[in-house]
Amino acid sequence: MAVLFVVDDDTDHLAALCDLMQAAGHVARGFSGGAAALAAMETPPDLLITDLRMPDMDGQALLTAIKAGAGDLPVIVLTGHGDVGHAVQAIRAGAEDFLEKPYDASHLVAVVARALAARATRTEVARLQQIIAEGAAATILGASRAMQAFRAGIAALAPLDLDVVITGETGTGKELAARALHAGSPRAAAPFVAVNCAALPEAMFETLMFGHAEGAFAGAGAARPGKLEAAEGGTLLLDEIEAMPLALQAKLLRVLQERAVERLGENGLRPVNIRVIATSKIDLQAAVAAQTFRPDLYYRLAGAVLQTPNLRVAATDIPLIFSHYSQLAARRYGRADPPLNFMLMQHLKDRVWHGNVRELRAAAEAHALGLYDGRGDDVPMLAEETLAEKLAGFEKREIAAALDRHRGNTLRVADALGLPRRTLNDKMRRYGLISDG
């Protein structure tokens, strides 16, 4: 049973919407304005539904304030006719989804259920990642020369209080390497704080990174430390730093040079004692040459540089990594360890793994459930399908993968797949990817 906040200045609509959510099995608390809902956030809900146009604090301002605090709280925005442009802005600011009034009640119930399920999945993934993080160094698998050299590099750098840049292709374990550096350092008992630079809203950068004083801006509430202060004594991970705009790079550089932050609304500096690790999917020196990354920030961060090996240079490790993750998945789901044979191993080594270890791990977990359709004798093969069935299967897998990538946000999925939103919803119903009730 989920707790929902429902915000609308129209009292009749607010009451009807709360009744609908109660009938769907949730606990609904109604608020006649954004300020009242924000004041009740001391005990945050599982999801919030808000109207966009309201006096005083509108839905957009409420969304911004929520994302500055409880950033993972799913927010669904309801809009009137002609407000779709504003709703798109809300999506870009972090809203989970939006519905235009008048909306279909069963569709809203389905959207709420999907958003709650997506959040539950993210929470579970975070829990599993924490388990992995506790033994981070041990989970950097591989016996190849490339992986042995990489582990040796981590072991050599971990005790040194140097800032480090980790580069590598997607799925090669850059964050895992960062956690291993932290775990092997004298800072291991202090916090490890990860910041996804690609998801940092530019307007909220200073508040999120540097913190703010009490009442520094409308809706600010009590004083809050930023990410840098939260990492005090420990390690700050700047993930996908290549995505940070140049203007924000300049602000970050000043703080890293001084090792001190000035909270928004304050005049004094607060010293911070942190180690900074930055990860990037691209060569930052090439980005410097292309003038998309500040050279002074690069040299400030690059006390040392590590590059994570991809599976092309560590191909001999593929069977070991696949076996490890398939066994872990089997135990997690209460299954027997899945058998591995020569044909399957050969297929794994011959396949091109564009997503590297992340993609290999997904295949291993599917194998543990008997769902990986590789060429091994131990893998169940499907009966011959018609062309129409194959096309439908492909379409369903692509839509499901896009829903995963975009956390169930149908607006973003429709845009990514080049489909009208109504067409996408029809296909989702046809393939059982959405519930009408």
Image (spheres, rainbow, N blue to C red):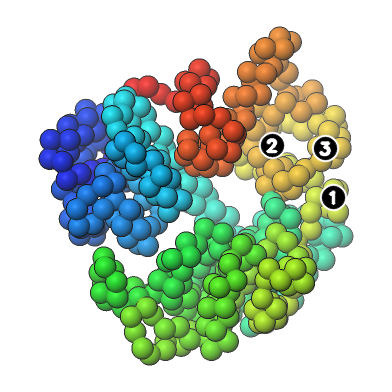
Residue 299 against residue 191 in the figure, above or below: below
Q: Which residue has dot 2 on it?
A: 363
* 6 or 120: nearer the viewer: 6
Please tell me which of labels 2 and 3 falls first in the chain: 3
Classify mark 1: helix, strand or loop: loop
Local crowd size for mark 2, using a 10 Å CA cut-off: few (<14), some (14–19), many (≥20): some
* Residue found at the far front of this picture: 82
Amino acid type of disc 2? Answer: Ala
Q: Is residue 155 visible?
A: no
Decide if residue 301 is on the left or right side of residue 144. Answer: left
Task: Please state the horizontal and vertical placement of residue 77, each as a whole percent of the image.
Answer: 33, 43
Residue 108 placement: quadrant: top left
Q: Which residue has dot 1 on it?
A: 312
Give the Cα separation between the discs numbered 2 and 3: 12 Å
- Quadrant holding the C terminus: top left
Task: Please state the horizontal and vertical placement of residue 333, each as a whole percent of the image.
Answer: 55, 35
Decide if residue 58 is on the left or right side of residue 410. Answer: left
Whether label 2 touches label 3, CB < 8 Å: no
Q: Residue at x 79, y 23 (%)?
A: 377
Q: Residue at x 58, y 67 (%)?
A: 245
Give the Cα separation between the discs numbered 1 and 2: 17 Å
Local crowd size for mark 3, using a 10 Å CA cut-off: few (<14), some (14–19), many (≥20): few
Please tell me which of labels 1 and 3 falls first in the chain: 1
Q: Which residue has dot 3 on it?
A: 351
Q: Residue at x 80, y 50 (%)?
A: 311
Total numbered labels placed on residues in the image: 3
Task: Please state the horizontal and vertical placement of residue 239, each as a whole percent of the image.
Answer: 60, 63
Q: Nearer the viewer, mark 1 or mark 2?
A: 1
Q: Residue at x 32, y 60 (%)?
A: 65
Amino acid type of disc 3? Answer: Arg
